[in-house]
Image (cartoon, rainbow, N blue to C red):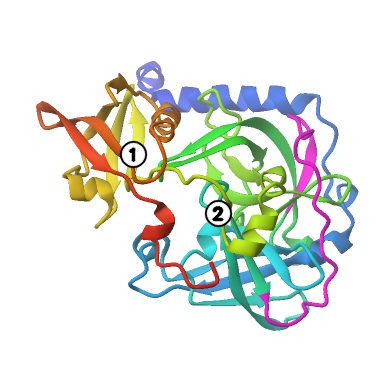
Amino acid sequence: MASRRFSAAPARLIAFAASILVLGAVIGSAPGCAADDVVPDSALSAVVRLQATVPGDARSASYLGTERDGSGVAIDGEGLVLTAGYLIVEAESITLTLADGRKVAATPVAYDNDSGFGLVRAIEPLKVKPIELGDSAPLRVRDRALVASFGGSAIALPALVVSRRSFAGYWEYLLENAIFTVPAHPAFSGAALISTDGKLVGIGSLAVPDAVGDNAEVPGNMFIPINRLKPILADLLEKGRAAGPKHPWLGINSQALFGRLFVTRVTAGGPAATAGIKQGDLVLGIGGEPVTDLEGFYRRLWASGEAGTTVQLDVLQGVKVNRIEVKSVDRYDFLKLGRSY
């Protein structure tokens, strides 16, 4: 009887056990990660709480909500705070809370679709020491760091880098050389990833089930590398967005399963919805070329031209494959962004 129960164990339990072995191999030769030997407490003073309120009719309200709460990091002495862009996109009011309990209103400065960063500026000096931007390029697997969300040392957790790789998100998002860490921090949104020399090397974006990669089920976090900010920071401060051509956007959320892209959500009023694509459809190809994963889909989509180009998608709808022309748009134009952007 016992043997029958064991043989019927779900494959995911076997995969989980294998993942633990993979994680053990990654961590095995890494040095210790005690929080007090990673960075001094003074580096944590730059991390603030960020709360944003978004109008109910905002494009992002249906999936990101109208009340958003996370962290941000002061990066200059004049109240400039870096955070995860989804916390502030389409926000109508933003409040920062400092370690001493002070609350300071802030205004949006920039939202960058491609990287996932957001910037806000406090309306008065924060009077905290900003954290210096570090260099995320040398960060390697088995390197130590500290994940710091608002709350000081009590909620700052030591972390280990377990992967550097591209990340493709279902919302038409592709980030090169993302930073993946373990263990998973529960308050990851906008959190600071701080290197052992006390500098900012990443901003928290997501909780992920496969931090190690290679289909290993090891939960962790994904961070946006700080080096992604440096070449666009001047543009973000001046124009609210990065300069250069904008990627074509379709308004499709999709998930790769069994070598096919399943449409899990279509943005109401977006290009794909207007063209007749629906939840449950399968995207088989783009421009006559097959696609089997999100990364390949986005690379082909963005190689097809700038925002506004018409994209041909091969879509399985029911039992019929249809070639559907979708006129892409600039996602910035679709979102209801304030003048500060």
Magenta part of the chain: 122-147
Residue type of the residue flagged with mark 1? Ser
Residue 286 appearing in the image: yes
Left or right for 55, reference 127: left
Give the quarter of the image for residue 319. top left
Near-viewer residue (98 or 332): 332
Residue 317 counted in the magenta span: no
Whole-percent x and y of residue 304? 38, 32
Q: Residue furthest left?
A: 319
- Give the residue pinned by disc 2: 112
Q: How many circles with numbers are drawn on the protein?
A: 2
Calculate the distance from the C-alpha at mark 2 to the C-alpha at mark 1: 21 Å
Foreground mark, 2 or 1, reads 2
Q: Amino acid at mark 2?
A: Asp
Q: Can you give x and y, in whole percent of width and height, for residue 35 in the image?
A: 83, 50
Residue 262 image point, x, y percent: 28, 34
Q: Residue 4: percent from the left, percent from the top?
A: 35, 18
Mark 1 residue element: strand
Mark 2, Cα crowd under 10 Å, few <14 / some 14-19 / many 20+, is: many
Residue 77 vs residue 215, the one in the foreground:
77
Q: Residue at x 66, y 44 (%)?
A: 228
297 sits to left or right of 162: left
User: Quarter of the image holding residue 189?
Assistant: bottom right
**Location of mark 1 (residue):** 254
Q: Nearer the viewer, residue 300 or 148?
A: 300
On residue 282, which mark appears?
none
Q: Secondary structure at mark 2?
A: loop
Label 2 or label 1, whichever comes before in sequence order: 2
Taking the magenta stretch, the answer to whether it contains residue 126 is yes
Image quarter where the N terminus lies is: top left
Kindly report the secondary structure that dominates the magenta region of the rendered protein. loop
Q: Is residue 321 above or below residue 329?
A: above
